[in-house]
Image (cartoon, helix red, strand yellow):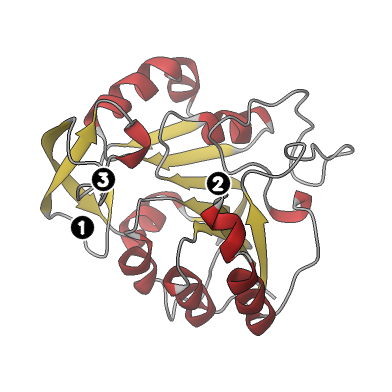
């Protein structure tokens, strides 16, 4: 069963997306592999965890559960921490061992969410592969897309409508009021976040082929430092 009051934040980072979802009135299940960040998340959201509105899973999202894998925390730029070194940054890493968790185990414990955000530094495709063939999928899904592979997986999962969202838009994100997802949040902190989601996204939904064309057309912007998310909607 899909829970309309539930959001998954897979790859929480410092937790600003989670804070936005909570402020809008949703329950949140977050997954964060980084042991250093996990500790700060537990401290930051102690009240929400205590009330049951937030569950933070200290594991690495993957295609199977229970494996022990290497995780590299970067002390200088936490945002590049992951299961491998950044191709252009060699220094500043501390190595940890973390356990993996897969989609099926998360939804077995918490149900299927209204919306799921996935940003796990290049590991999106293997995590998404296990969702192919699932009978129930979130109404909305988003992935960081430096490449098309995660978007191809969303199409295989069953999504048919897509939006390419610039995460560094001119003038910043638009805060929709009256809200179309949960409650209105005045002056949200969108620093280092995925921003709006679902019915509050700007622009028109497109079919997959149109999304691919938009993705290729955005190459010059990516070279200028812009980064993009793919948002998908179940038709």
Badge 2 marks a residue whose secondary structure is strand
Badge 3 marks a residue whose secondary structure is loop
Where residue 46 sits: x, y (%)?
Answer: 42, 16
* Nearer mark to the viewer, of 1 and 3: 3
Residue 82's disc is: 3
Q: Residue at x 39, y 67 (%)?
A: 128
Badge 1 marks a residue whose secondary structure is loop
Q: Is residue 80 visible?
A: yes
- Say whether residue 115 is left or right of residue 172: left
Residue 141 position (above or below residue 178): below
> Residue extending furthest right?
178
- Say whether residue 177 is left or right of residue 225: right
Between marks 1 and 3, how big is the CA–CA gap?
17 Å
**Pick the front one: 181 or 173:** 173
Residue 51 position (above or below residue 68): above
Where residue 41 sits: x, y (%)?
Answer: 38, 24
Residue 91's disc is: none
Residues tagged 2 and 3 counted as in contact (Cβ below 8 A): no
């Amino acid at each position: 069963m899909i829970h309309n009051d539930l959001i998954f934040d897979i790859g929480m980072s410092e937790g600003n997306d989670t804070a936005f979802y909570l402020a809008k009135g949703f329950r949140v299940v977050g997954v964060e592999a980084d042991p250093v960040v996990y500790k700060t998340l537990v401290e930051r959201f102690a009240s929400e965890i205590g009330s049951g509105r937030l569950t933070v899973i200290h594991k690495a999202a993957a295609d199977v559960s229970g494996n022990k894998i290497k995780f590299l925390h970067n002390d200088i730029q936490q945002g590049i921490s992951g299961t491998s070194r950044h191709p252009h940054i060699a220094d500043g890493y501390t190595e940890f061992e973390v356990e993996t968790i897969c989609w099926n185990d998360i939804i077995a414990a918490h149900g299927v969410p209204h919306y799921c955000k996935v940003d796990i530094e290049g590991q999106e495709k293997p995590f998404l592969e296990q969702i192919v063939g699932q009978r129930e999928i979130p109404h909305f899904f988003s992935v960081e897309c430096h490449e098309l592979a995660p978007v191809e997986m969303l199409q295989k999962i069953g999504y048919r409508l897509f939006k390419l969202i610039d995460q560094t838009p001119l003038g910043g994100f638009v805060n929709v009021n009256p809200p179309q997802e949960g409650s209105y949040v005045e002056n949200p902190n969108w620093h280092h976040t995925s921003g709006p989601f679902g019915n509050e996204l700007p622009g028109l939904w497109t079919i997959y082929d149109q999304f691919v064309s938009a993705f290729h057309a955005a190459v010059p912007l990516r070279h200028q430092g812009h980064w993009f998310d793919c948002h998908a909607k179940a038709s």
